[in-house]
Image: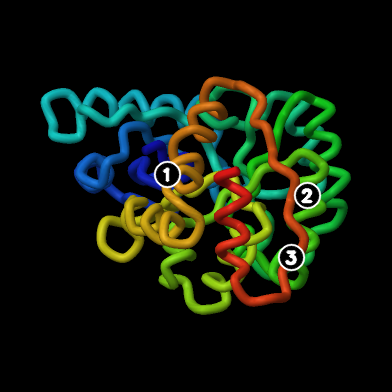
Amino acid sequence: MIDLHNHLLPGIDDGAKKLEETLEFLRIASRDGVKVVVATPHMKPGVYDNRRETILQRVALVREAQRGDESEGVTLLPGAEVYYTADLAARARANELMTVGDGGRYLLLELPYQQAPLRVDDTIFQLRLLGITPLMAHPERVAYYLEDIERVAASVRLGALTQVTGSSLTGRFGDKARDFARAMLERNLIHVLASDGHDVRYRPPVLSDAVRAVDSLIGETAARRLVEDTPQAILDGREVEIEEALPPFRRRGLFSRVRSFFHR
């Protein structure tokens, strides 16, 4: 599996504090079957003023510490969780933003949790014109999307991808996030599952539980696509083919209908 969202770099944001904790992050991920982890510290002006150079230096530090450690089998790549700002497109044009895997092609984008951001669709459009595909971080926990799932569908139509936190599907973030994530799954609006791991105890970098949950709902092939095929395409800088979003279902048996869609 590939984990595209993880706060494991030491002492750089609200994730791991020390290098030993970072190594334990990677050990846990390895035991869970994760082979590649993208470190995505917050890039939030005025709060976490992380720059590309800082992130690359911290990744190099961790890679050196992995030598001879149990975590050595996990490939660590650089990235960032970029906070939404009104001048995001201008920052992208100025090459100020760290992309997923530092590949320049995909951007993990975090909207405010509670505030209603302005011009989201326009920003997605502007990023796409720059050749950057936004990967919307945990929409199932963002008020802007929670108010109306059609906003998720609109972002996807404009070319954005979505990344749902695995533990949202298993209920760790409460019923609201779980139900919204499953509604997104029903609508074919989830493209990537990631751990969004922040610590080794309460928010560990584990994906297998979520994969089993998706498997039970729509099948193993679709579940694996969310943690293997699509994340690999993103890291390779390839265009991800987005299936057309499904309309809302109002009758019973909706998951069986979604299952048939993924397996036809």
- Going 28% across and 25% down the picture, which residue do you hit? 63
Label 3 neighbourhood size at 10 Å, few (<14), some (14-19), many (20+)? some
Rendering coords of residue 235 (x, y %): 52, 26
Label of residue 12 in the image? 1
Residue that numbered label 2 is attached to: 155
197 relative to 155 in the view: left or right: left
Residue that numbered label 3 is attached to: 149
Q: Are marks 2 and 3 in contact (CB under 8 Å)?
A: no
User: Does residue 173 sit above or below 98 in this rendering?
Assistant: below
For the C terminus, give its image quadrant: top right
Answer whether residue 244 is visible to the viewer in this image.
yes
- Going 46% across and 43% down the picture, which residue do you hit? 221
Label 2 neighbourhood size at 10 Å, few (<14), some (14-19), many (20+)? many
Residue kind at label 3, given as amino acid type:
Ile
Rendering coords of residue 240 (x, y %): 64, 31
Label of residue 44 in the image? none
User: Does residue 9 sit above or below 54 in this rendering?
Assistant: below
Label 1: element kind? loop
Label 2: element kind? helix
User: Does residue 107 sit above or below 207 in this rendering?
Assistant: above
**Earlier-in-chain disc, 3 versus 1:** 1
Label 3: element kind? helix
How far apart are the two marked residues, 3 and 1, measured between alpha carbons? 33 Å
Q: Are marks 3 and 1 in contact (CB under 8 Å)?
A: no
- Going 53% across and 20% down the picture, which residue do you hit? 236
Residue kind at label 2, given as amino acid type:
Ser
Residue kind at label 1, given as amino acid type:
Ile
Q: How many discs mark residues in the rendered view?
A: 3
User: Which numbered mark, 3 or 1, is in the foreground of this view?
Assistant: 3
Answer whether residue 45 is visible to the viewer in this image.
no
Q: Nearer the viewer, residue 146 or 188?
A: 188
